[in-house]
Image: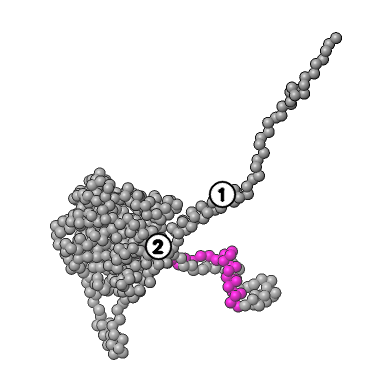
Amino acid sequence: MAIVKEEPNSSRKKPTKTPNSKPNPNPNPFTFWFYFTISISLLTLIFVTISNLTTHQDPKTWFLTLPTNLRSHYSNGRIIKVQPTPHSDSIELFTIQSGPPDSSHNVLIVHGLASSSFGFRKVVESLGENGVHAVAIDLPGSGFSDKFETVTEEKVIGGFGKLVELYNEIKEKGIFWGFDQLVEQGYVNYDYEENEIRLSKVESLRAIELGPEEMGRVLGEVIETMGLAPVDLVLHDSAFSLGANWVAENLGLVSSVTLLDSSSNQTAFPLWVLRVPVVREVVAGFGFVFKNVVQTCCLKSGGGGGFDVEGHRLLLKGRNGLESVVGMGKKMNRSFSIAEWGQLDGVKDLPMRVIWAEEWIEQGKQVAGELNQATFVTHSGGRWPEDDTADELSKSIYEFVSKLTKPVKVTKKKEHIPEHIRQMVDEATTNVHHHGLGGHSHGHGHGGHDHSHGHGYSEEVGYPNAYGLGNEFS
C-alpha cells in the first residue's frame, strides 16, 4: 500500500511574483516651474544685454558718458562742413590740428576703417612741435563726425497706407462727413481718383557709407576748406584704396603721399567680425573681447603702450557707427592694383613713402615693391598707431616731407566783380550799418560751433564750447 506523505505548508514553494518597478513618487509641480523660471530669466538676460548693446543712445547722453580723455579730444578739435555727394545735405566733420597754419608743409592724416583721429592725436601733436601744420580728420561715419544722414524718399501709398490716409481725412473733416459719404455713395470718397498713384515723402536716417567717389569729394572739400593745398597726404590702412583715385585726378593739390600700414585690398581690423550680427554686438559691446581682437590684428605683440583700447571701442560703437564702417568696407575697391596706379601719368612722379610695422614687414615690402618711386621704412609699433611710437611715426613723416621741395601754395584767384554789382553791395552794406545791424557772418552757430564758409581756416571751422557739445550733441 502506497503511503502519501504531505509536505508541511511552510515548505511549499511560494509562487514567484514578477518584480515590479518601484512606483514613481508623486511629481513635484515646483520642478517644472523652477526650470521654466530659470530658462525665462536667462533668455531675458540675453535679450536685455543685446538690446542694451544695440540701443540708439541720445547723442548728448552718449557724449556725457564718455571718459575725460575722449571729451578732451573733442574739445580740442574743430568742426567743418562737407558734402559727401552733390545732392546730399552737408554733414559735420571732426578735425584736429597742430602746428603753425603758415607752415611750408601741410600734412593731412586720413585714418582707416574702424579707426579715427583719436589714434593719431599724439602724431599730430608731435608734428606740430616740429613746425609742421598737421591735421587729422574723422571720416564721415567715424569718430566724432556725423554717422547718419537724413534722407527723404518717395513711397507709393497703397493698401494699409491708403487706410491711414482715409483715417486722417475723416479725422480732419469729421466722422459725420465720412458717414454722409458712405450713405450717399456707398463708399467714402476722399478726393482722389481711383487709379491715381499716391506718393508720400518719408524721412529716415541712413548710415553714412563712403565709397571711393564720396571719399575723394570729402578729401577735396577738407583741403579746400582748411587751405591745405598742396597737401602732404598720409593715408592709413584702407584710406589708400578709398582715396587713390582722387589723388590721381587731383595731382595739383597733392605734394606727396605717405602710405602708413596701408595696402590695397585688406584692412588691419577684421571687418568680418562686424558683419555678423551677434558677433558684432559682442565684439563692440564687451571691452575685453574688443581688446583681444585689436591686440591680435592691430597692435604689436606685447605692445600697446599707452593705447586706449576702450576709447577706440566707444568711438566705434557710439551712435551705432558700426553700420557705417561695415558699409564702407563693402564699397572698398578690392580689384585696385597698386602697380597700375603707381604708373599713372603724374602719379609716377609723385614723391611717396611707405611706412610699415616691423611685425608685418613682408606685407609692407610687397606694397613698396609695386611703387618704384616710394621709399620704404619701418616702425616698431602696430598697424594702429600707439602712443609710445607716436614720436617715431611723426619723425619718419617729418624727415620725408621736410626734404621735399617747398611747395607753392595754391590760392584762389579773386573773380572780377562788375562795377554796378560792387555799387549795389556797397549801398547794401551802408544801409546795414546805418540801421545798426552790424556785420553778419555767414555762420551757423549750433551749440557752440560756428560753421562759417569763408576762405580762411580760422573762418571755416567751428570751435566746440567748454563742454565739447556741438550741433549733434546739444
How many residues crowd mark 1 within 10 Å: few (<14), some (14–19), many (20+)? few
Q: Quadrant of the C terminus?
A: bottom left
The disc at residue 319 is 2
Residue that appears at 67% across and 76% down: 180
Q: Residue at x 29, y 79 (%)?
A: 441
- Visible residue check, residue 405: yes
Query: Please, what is the three-letter code of the amino acid marked with disc 1?
Result: Tyr
Number of dots carrying numbers: 2
Considering the numbered disc 1 on the image, is that residue within a helix, a strand or a loop?
A: helix
Q: Which residues are magenta?
A: 146-173
Mark 2 burial class by Cα count in 10 Å: few <14, some 14-19, many 20+: many
Q: Amino acid at mark 2?
A: Arg
> Which residue reaches farthest top?
1
Whether pointer 2 and pointer 1 mark residues with C-beta atoms closer than 8 Å, the reply is no
Tell me, yes or no, whether the highlighted magenta stretch contains residue 167. yes
- Please say if 111 is above or below 360: below
Answer yes or no: is residue 243 visible.
no
Residue identifier under label 1: 35
- Which one is in front, 5 or 258? 5
Q: Quadrant of residue 404?
A: bottom left
